[in-house]
């Protein structure tokens, strides 16, 4: 069986009651036991200020303030006063100076409104308006300001649009001339079709002399060198030993192909079978003549006259 625990003291079962005129009610107390009371009426004690005495005090205080006949000693409270006249101390701000400060502050305020925002070390400025909307400066990725120049006064001596038009016309003529060229080299202009033109290089005077080794002989010059063109204007071939029953003059185009201008011509001994005209030979071509009716050791000759040319490169 567990031990029984008893309180050391018992509460006094006494209750305080009050009557509201009809019923009895217990008195209200707070958590500390303090009685909660509504003060309905109180009789003023001896010497207490009344509403009448306070009104008299206020009247007298107002009269003294009006006449400045008021001496405050050991004042521990603040007085609400209306200052009608007050002399400014030396250096005090005046209304006029405050107006100047207000105007300057208004300029600062307008400047602030013209700014986009302020950073730690720079200001982003809104330089102008489009309608009523602020616009920032436009820059590219490198930070270069992008500007549309609407009007600009030309400096002295500056080029005008009219002069530039004249220059453009002249440059167009140069461009047209260049378009007529094949290409531009470092030291010369190459004209279209110049590879079909010939330039004089030198006189062409050739003689070929051989002794016959057969009844029919073909005489040829050396081949035309690379880069040259020969214009042959006269060719003569003859047999100094006997009469020629048949002879011809032409071009040896390659190693085996001949192109004959004159064929089957006859001539007396030492007399020429001749060609007079224009015969053009390119690189590798040769002037050629044939003589028939020869005897071994007959003396045969061919003479070539004309001029050497080069192709324009």
Image (cartoon, rainbow, N blue to C red):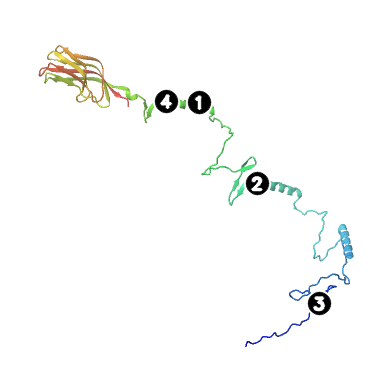
Q: Is residue 273 above or below residue 177?
A: above
| Crowding at mark 1 (Cα within 10 Å: few <14, some 14-19, many 20+) | few
- Residue 25, given in percent of the width and then of the height, sits at 80, 74
Residue picked out by circle 1: 166
Residue picked out by circle 3: 17
**Precedes in sequence: disc 1 or disc 3:** 3
Most foreground residue, 71 or 82: 82
Residues at marks 3 and 4, CA–CA distance in whole angstroms = 131 Å
* Local secondary structure at mark 2: helix
**Precedes in sequence: disc 4 or disc 2:** 2
**Precedes in sequence: disc 1 or disc 4:** 1
Report if the CB atoms under discs 4 and 2 are less than 8 Å apart: no
Given this view, does label 1 or label 3 mark the residue nearer the observer? 3
- Residue 79, given in percent of the width and then of the height, sits at 81, 61
**Residue 177's mark?**
4
**Residue 113's mark?**
2
- Residue 210, given in percent of the width and then of the height, sits at 14, 20
**Precedes in sequence: disc 1 or disc 2:** 2
Residues at marks 1 and 4, CA–CA distance in whole angstroms = 17 Å
* Local secondary structure at mark 1: helix
Most foreground residue, 24 or 40: 24
């Amino acid at each position: 069986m567990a031990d029984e625990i008893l309180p050391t003291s018992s509460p006094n079962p006494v209750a305080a009651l009050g009557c509201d005129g009809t019923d009895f009610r217990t008195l209200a107390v707070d958590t500390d036991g303090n009685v909660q009371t509504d003060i309905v009426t109180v009789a003023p004690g001896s010497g207490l200020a009344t509403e009448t005495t306070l009104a008299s005090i206020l009247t007298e205080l107002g009269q003294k303030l009006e006449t400045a006949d008021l001496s405050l000693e050991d004042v521990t409270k603040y007085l609400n006063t209306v200052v009608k006249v007050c002399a400014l101390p030396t250096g005090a701000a005046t209304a006029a100076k405050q107006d100047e400060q207000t105007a300057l502050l208004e300029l600062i305020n307008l400047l602030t409104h013209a700014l986009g925002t302020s950073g730690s070390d720079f200001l982003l400025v809104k330089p102008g308006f489009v309608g009523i909307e602020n616009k920032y400066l436009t820059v590219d990725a490198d930070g270069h300001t992008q500007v549309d120049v609407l009007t600009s006064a030309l400096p002295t001596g500056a080029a005008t649009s009219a002069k530039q038009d004249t220059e453009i016309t002249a440059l167009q003529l140069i461009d047209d001339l260049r378009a007529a060229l094949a290409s531009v080299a470092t030291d010369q202009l190459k004209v279209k079709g110049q590879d079909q033109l010939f330039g004089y290089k030198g006189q062409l005077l050739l003689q070929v002399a051989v002794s016959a080794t057969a009844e029919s002989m073909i005489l040829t010059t050396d081949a035309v060198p690379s880069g040259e063109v020969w214009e042959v204007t006269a060719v003569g071939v003859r047999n100094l030993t006997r009469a020629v029953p048949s002879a011809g003059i032409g071009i040896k185009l390659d190693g085996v192909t001949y192109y004959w201008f004159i064929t089957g011509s006859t001539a007396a001994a030492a007399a020429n079978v001749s060609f007079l005209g224009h015969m053009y030979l390119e690189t590798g071509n040769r002037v050629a003549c044939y003589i028939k009716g020869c005897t071994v050791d007959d003396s045969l000759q061919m003479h070539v006259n004309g001029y050497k040319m080069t192709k324009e490169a």
